[in-house]
Amino acid sequence: MQERFRGAYAALTDFIAAHPGIEIGRSVTSIPEEVRGEFYALFNAARCAFLADAFPGWLSDANDLRRAWCRAATFRATARRTKTCG
């Protein structure tokens, strides 16, 4: 894995180690409410870093697709209001 993921994953595992109330195993997942928000912020950062490192082209393509969809949705809404398109 690349450095981006390693850093984000290290931050997550350090956080888990510093909070012994967090339990993650085969049959249990317990994240105390008082640390849940920060845990999931770190978890999501690690997830996003993994995807960015492992599939950089896919994320760029997905962003291009999102922009194209937004343009199409805006065009359709405008066409409905002006009735210039069928």
Image (spheres, grey):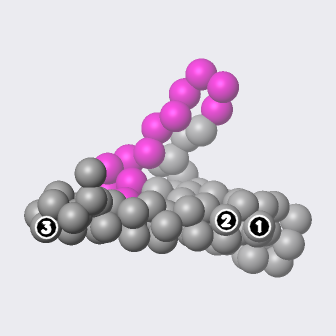
Q: Secondary structure at mark 1?
A: helix
Spatial CA distance of label 3 from label 1 is 37 Å
Between residues 68 and 80, which one lies in front from this camera angle? 80
Amino acid type of the residue that numbered disc 2 sits on in the rendered structure: Asp
Q: Classify 10 Å Cα crowding around label 2: few (below 14), some (14-19), many (20 and above).
A: few
Q: Are marks 3 and 1 in contact (CB under 8 Å)?
A: no
Q: Secondary structure at mark 2?
A: helix
The residue depicted at 72 percent of the width and 61 percent of the height is: 58
CB under 8 Å between discs 2 and 1 = yes
Q: Secondary structure at mark 3?
A: helix
- Residue 22 location, x and y as percent? 51, 47
Asked if the residue under mark 3 is in contact with the one under mark 2, i.e. CB atoms within 8 Å, the reply is no
Q: Quadrant of the N terminus?
A: bottom right
User: Is 41 located above or below residue 33 in the figure?
Assistant: below
In the displayed structure, 28 sits above or below 41; it is above
- Labelled disc at residue 82: 3
Residue 54 location, x and y as percent? 81, 61
Please tell me whether residue 70 belongs to the stretch shown in magenta.
no
**Residue in front for this viewpoint, 21 or 68:** 68
The residue at 59%/38% (across/down) is: 24
Q: Which residues are magenta?
A: 25-37
Residue at the extreme right of the image, as rendered: 1
Q: Residue at x 48, y 70 (%)?
A: 67
Farthest-out residue, left = 81
Residue 24, label in figure: none
Q: Is residue 86 left or right of residue 9?
A: left
Give whichever of discs 3 and 1 has the lower sequence position.
Answer: 1
Question: Relative to residue 66, is residue 71 drawn left or right?
Answer: left
Q: Which residue is mark 1?
A: 57
User: What residue is disc 2 on?
Assistant: 61
